[in-house]
Amino acid sequence: MTKEEIILANQQYLFPSVFHYYKDPLVVTHAKDQFVWDADGNQYLDFFGGIVTVSVGHCNETVNKKVHEQMDKLQHVSTVFANEPQAALAKRIAGITPGGKLTKSFFTNSGTEANETAILAARCYTGSHEIVALRHSYHGRSAVAMALTGNASWRLGGAAPSGFVHALNAYCYRCPLHLTYPSCNVQCARDMDEMIRTSTSGRIAAFLAEPIQGVGGVITPPKEYFEIISGIVKKFGGLFISDEVQTGWGRSGGKWFGIEQWGVIPDIITSAKGLGNGSPIGLTVARPEVADALKGTTISTFGGNPVTATAAKAVIDYIDDHKLMINAAETGAYLRGKLEEMKAKYPIIGEVRGMGLMQAMELVEDRESKKPAVEATLAVLEMARENRLLIGKGGTWGNVIRVTPPLNISKSDVDDFALRLDASLKQVTQKQMATA
């Protein structure tokens, strides 16, 4: 198909809710390592990684070699048969979870399914129904996952399932309590006690949260936030579910999971995306007693698929063997420095935040009012494309630039990225000044 035929087929045969970032859809044909090529042969530096999914580079040869070997050996058997790749992956994951306490896994196909499985397990274990999530969060595209999500833009279809409430999150740049950290004493976390007492039955099944909110705009909490929250949740009988769909597998730097940055051991971890480096996978891993509470029988036709499980274990091994968690911390710090330099140059950048190789810039019309610069964000995205750079967008108002490259990028890649993004910001701000 030609580029035009691909775009036309998308318009005619896909749901219109399948949206594209750009005014003219970018038709991607192939990719390798940190680069992507379009149908016109243009090469792009990919610093978004398929929405925080390409963790060890596009078409990683080490991972793909093992995938190809497995495809020629055994492609599919479903969970009603035992197979080595699924067992080996579950054993590997049990050995790296926080404190070694989460040792039983259930594999599915996406982060959405992983979160649904976690909710079901928590309800079975506690005998309670209500789930607490955070404002500005994103947890998937099913009806239940959208009910969990704390962002109206991602909650489709009208009325949501019952049993979900949303607590204050630690969005310090736009503090809902109009306080300033650290003099605030992290009141947003301490409010959880009153919120549960007044907005739930008083006994909850679980609290589910992203250690760093991805789609919400890489919102990064103060170090005390989750420790305070965890204590309150336990007091009301709830489990702590850490949604690591975006923060897992070393992305936050130096640790396998984002929640480890906050010194908290959850009861359940969910993940997807970077675990498969593009292969569709979902993971729910829990403490044994929590997993054991899911009585009865269940299956996942494609969960634990031998090919996908082989890919996931190969990804974990590659991250470990190549010390990519260390690279995420060190190169992430270098990347953060470049973003801070841009903030000093361009008043449109209200805040830079994130950890490791999960960074973001929130764009505002002016730093005093902090009014979201929505149109400018779209313009930066388009200009970055012109400069052959792929970056992401997020935030409740759609005014946050997200930067999530593969974990095996180098500082020279960051230098290249910085030149392209700086040029894009400069072109957009100059255009704004010319039309002001």
Image (cartoon, rainbow, N blue to C red):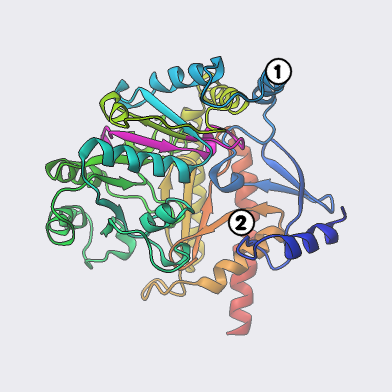
Q: Is residue 206 left or right of residue 331?
A: left
- Please give the label number shown on residue 421: 2
Q: Position of residue 74 (x, y in %)?
A: 66, 19
Is residue 63 depicted above or below 110 in this figure? above
* Secondary structure of the residue carrying numbered label 2: helix
Which residues are drawn in magenta?
262-282
Q: In percent of the image, x 58 and y 71: which residue is there?
A: 429
Q: Position of residue 31 (x, y in %)?
A: 73, 40
- Which quarter of the picture shows residue 261? top left
Judge whether residue 340 can be spotted in this image.
Answer: no
Q: Is residue 44 left or right of residue 194?
A: right
- Give the residue pinned by disc 1: 69
Q: In percent of the image, x 42 and y 67: which residue is there?
A: 152
- Residue 360 forms part of the magenta stretch: no
Depth check: 433 or 63 in front?
63
User: Which amino acid type is marked by label 1?
Assistant: Glu
Using the numbered discs, state the Cα–Cα distance from disc 1 to disc 2 in whole angstroms. 39 Å
Counting the numbered discs, the total is 2
- Which quarter of the picture shows residue 243? top left
Categorize mark 2 by other alpha carbons within 10 Å: few (<14), some (14-19), many (20+). many
